[in-house]
Structures are given as C-alpha cells and as structure tokens.
C-alpha cells in the first residue's frame, strides 16, 4: 500500500473520530468520578442545568439519543437523588425530568469540569473552540447526508 491509498486506516475520519471519542470519554472519567457520575449522566445533567426541566422526548433530541437509551440513565440519576421523573399534568404521556436540589447543587462542582478538561488535554480555549466549531460543522454535514438518503 502507498500513502495515497484511500483505505489506509489512519487516514479515515471515522477511525479518528472513534479513537478520539473513546479517549475523551476516558479522560473525563477521573474528573467525573468524584462527582459520582458517568459521562453520559454528565451530558444529561448539562442539558438539565441549561433547561431546568425537559420532557424525555426533547431531552433525547437535544442529546441525539433514543429515549429508550436515556431512560436507564435517568433512572440512575433519580436513584442518586440528582433528578426526578414526573408525568406531565398537562399530558400524562409526557415524562418530565427535573433536577432535584442535589442535582442543582452539583452544578457548582461541575463548573470546574471544562477548566480541568482543558488542562488535561493541554489545549487552549481557542483551540478547543476551533475544534468544537469543526465538530459542529461535521455533525451538521452528517445529518444533511442522512436527509438525502
């Protein structure tokens, strides 16, 4: 194989993203462990800290996940006393997820997570911002490609 081979593993965007994703999630683990939460739970909490209360369908859309994938995470957050699940009074079919006082209080500790992650990754805020913009562009492009199929 030559370096121009389009099928060289190290040249594949999908491979780089997979390895980077696993590495980033692993790097978050020691930062989130003292808070008693996993990376997927952290993502749910980020959405709740931003929106306060979300129905399960909206939360799933925000996180680009299936509601069935999020249900066990939310149940664990509820068991930890960080979130609560309540049927909507307006529509009994809707399940609303809300932060508990303990979940709200955890936000103060979580505010240090981005700072600590930047240190661990050895990247400046500008570098992380550029990477984030590129990733959002990639996400949008992948979503557009799915719409054309």
Image (cartoon, rainbow, N blue to C red):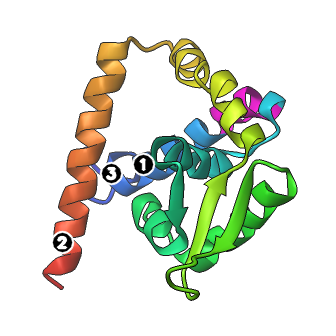
Residue 115, percent from left and from top:
54, 15
Callout in the foreground (2, 3): 2
**Dominant SS in magenta:** helix
Q: Is residue 6 above or below residue 135?
A: below
Q: Residue at x 65, y 23 (%)?
A: 108
Residue 125, percent from left and from top:
36, 15
In front of the other: 20 or 133: 133
How far apart are labels 3 and 1 at the CA level?
6 Å
Label 2, residues with CA under 10 Å away: few <14, some 14-19, many ≥20: few
Q: Is residue 88 above or below residue 118?
A: below
In front of the other: 10 or 37: 37
Residue 130: image quadrant is top left
The region drawn magenta spans: 26-33
- Determine if residue 4 is in view: no
Mark 3–mark 1 CB contact (< 8 Å): yes
Instruction: Identify the residue under disc 3.
Output: 13
Residue 92: image quadrant is bottom right
Label 3, residues with CA under 10 Å away: few <14, some 14-19, many ≥20: few
- Determine if residue 110 is in view: yes
Q: Residue at x 57, y 76 (%)?
A: 88
Q: Residue at x 41, y 67 (%)?
A: 61
Rendered image: mark on residue 145: 2
Rendered image: mark on residue 17: 1
């Amino acid at each position: 194989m030559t370096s121009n081979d389009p099928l060289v593993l190290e040249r594949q965007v999908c491979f780089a993203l997979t390895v980077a994703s696993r590495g980033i999630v692993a790097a978050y683990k020691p930062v989130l462990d003292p808070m008693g939460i996993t990376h997927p739970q952290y993502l749910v909490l980020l959405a709740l800290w931003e929106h306060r209360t979300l129905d399960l369908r909206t939360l799933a859309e925000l996180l680009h996940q299936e509601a069935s994938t999020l249900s066990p995470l939310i149940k664990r957050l509820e068991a930890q006393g960080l979130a609560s699940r309540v049927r909507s009074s307006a529509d009994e079919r809707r399940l609303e997820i809300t932060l508990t006082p303990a979940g709200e209080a955890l936000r103060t500790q979580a505010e240090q997570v981005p700072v600590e992650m930047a240190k661990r990754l050895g990247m400046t805020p500008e570098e992380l911002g550029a990477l984030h913009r590129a990733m959002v562009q990639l996400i949008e492009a992948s979503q557009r490609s799915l719409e054309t199929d």
